[in-house]
Structures are given as C-alpha cells and as structure tokens.
Amino acid sequence: MTETNSVASLSLDLDNKWSYMKTHGDAGWEIFPSYLDIVVPRVLELLDKHKLTITFFVVGQDAALEENHAALKSIADAGHEIGNHSFHHEPWLHLYSAAEVEAELSRAHEHIEKATGQSPIGFRGPGFSVSETVLRVLINMGYKYDCSTFPTFLGPLARAYYFLTMRLTPEEKAQRKKLFGTFSEGLRPNKPYTWLVDASKLTEIPVTTMPLIKIPIHASYILYLAKFSPAIAMLYFRTAIKLCRLTGVQPSILLHPLDFMTLDDAPELAFFPAMHTPLAKKLDVMAKIFNVMTDQFEVLSMQAHVEHIRSTQALRTIVPKFGDNRS
C-alpha cells in the first residue's frame, strides 16, 4: 500500500432517539427520550475490541442535558474525537439564515465542550445538510474540516421513500423538500478537497460512496442488505472497498447508533430499516465491516485523517455552489 491510500476513517453520527422521532413526525420527541446509556457502552466495547479510535458527532441538545453527560464523557475518556453535529439536529439547516446558523453551531459547540471536555474542530450537518453559509460560519469559528457532503445520485429516491413512510404535514414536507439533496449531489467529488469561501479554506471529507457509480456504502446500507443475505452484503462492501483502493479513494465510512441497536432497544423506531434484525446478527456484520477496514487500511479518526491528508496531498480547491436554498 502506498502512503496516500493506506488510511481510512470511521465516524458515527450520534443521533438520539428523539431526533429520529422528530424527523419521522412522531409525538413525544419534545421531551428528548434517549438511548445513549444503552448504545454508547455497546459501541465503545466493540471499538475497543477492534482497537479503533473514531469520531463521534454529537448533537448539542443532548450535550445540554445533564442526564447525558456521563455517556458523552465516556466517549471522550475512551480517546475518541468529538465533533459537532448541530444543536437541534434539523436536516434543513441549509435553509437557516447566517445568524441562525451561527447561533445553532456555536450553541452546540459550547454545550459539547462542556459535556465532553473536548472542543470540536470538525462538523457534519444533520441529514448531510450544508450550505455556503454553514461553511463560512465554520471557518469563522476556527473549525478545521467539514464532512457533510454525500456524493450520491440517490438523494431524490431516499427523499421519496422518506415522504412515503413519515407522518408529515404539508408544511413539514415543504420544509424538508431538499432533504438528502438533489441528483446533482452525485457529481460532487468522492475524494477529499478544499472549500474556498471568501479567500478562506476548509477541508472537506465526503462520506464515501461506491467509486464510479456513487451508491451508498455506509453501515446502515450494509445492514439492510444483510437482512436478505449477509454474504451478499459483505461482498457488496468488500467490492466497494476494493474499488476505493483501485481508484485511490481513502474511504470515510459512516456509522449510526441504530447500526448497533434493535427493536428491543427502541421500539419507537420500528420504521428504521433493519431494526428487526437480531442484535447478535447486527453486531456480527459490524465486526465484519471493521475487519475489512482494518485489514485494508490504517483506520483513523476524522481529525487524524484530515491531518494525514494535509501532510501527504495537494487537494483540489472548489468554490461552493449549492443552488437554490443552499446559498
């Protein structure tokens, strides 16, 4: 393996029960029900078993609640990086005004730092929501990287499925009309690059999709395929990783809490794919994903991945163009 393609990264968006309920349009999310005390120890145990250090993107609202502090602090105490995943976890963040974005991100940063003892330097938008305004605020806050882009052509299909399965009012549907992006998102690079905003720069590490055909490969998709055939699911993932190696893509693979949970842990989230899969089967698939990654790459946190990229590559520079409602 060459120096430039021998590394990869793993990150986990620590979306909580209430955030899924909110996005789904379910009542009761306003009291912020949580499963962090269940899922965080489970994830940390599996990561420790595989000797992995990754990045957890934390939602500010969770960090603001005292009852979540022990779980969140345990992540930082285990040596993992803490990133900013917004305060309210609203996938229409790209519709916010500049003042709203600044308040949203700085409030999340403050509470995350207080709860974990870490000051975030990286951001991922909820639902891959990003805009030029978000990038400008991140630069002004001194952040080193963003990883909110998801280069796939399947965003409109995901949004159509979302609207079919969610209980939303017409107003809520209008608010979410750009959720998961447009077909043009698939034209974005799969490799890291540099955003150029008002003469300032910010490193972007996209959530990796299958090279060439730009279909999703993050863990939730592998688990969905494993419902039908674990062997085919892992063949799919191994093929994606092989294509990453062949095309020089350093994969940055995304995880979610529900990749480590079942219906027994959160019956309210039965609508989420693969929630009926037994826990042992899910954890076995996750272990196999980790094994494929560690067999092929040195797996890093997002911060370490960014530092490696900056020290070994000259990145392409891109001026952000997000189209309507993403300026």
Image (cartoon, rainbow, N blue to C red):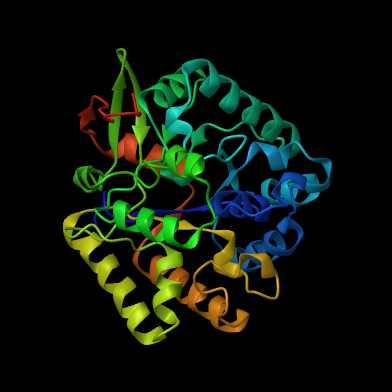
Residue 54 placement (x, y as % from top left): 53, 52
Q: Nearer the viewer, residue 1 or 167?
A: 167
Tell me which corner region of the image, top left, top right, bottom left or bottom right, holds residue 283.
Answer: bottom right
Residue 48 is left or right of residue 250, and the answer is: right
The quarter holding residue 110 reads top right
- 193 horizontally vs 68: left or right: left
Question: Which residue is at a point 69% across and 38% down the rendered structure image?
Answer: 61
Position above or below: 146 against 267:
above
Residue 290 placement, left or right of 248: right
Name the residue rendered at 65%, 61% in the picture: 44
Residue visible at 30% across and 79% down in the picture: 235
Q: Quadrant of the N terminus?
A: bottom left
Q: Nearer the viewer, residue 176 or 121?
A: 176
Residue 316: x and y in percent read 20, 33
- Of residues 278 and 175, the one nearer the viewer is 175
x, y percent for residue 57: 56, 44
How many labels sit on residues?
Answer: 0
Q: Is residue 157 left or right of residue 130?
A: left
Residue 201 higher or lower than 281, as above or below = above
* Residue depicted at x 57% and y 73%: 275
Work out which residue is located at the far right of the displayed protein and give it.
67
Quadrant hosting residue 106: top right
Image quarter where the C terminus lies is: top left
Which residue is situated farthest in the top direction here?
A: 198
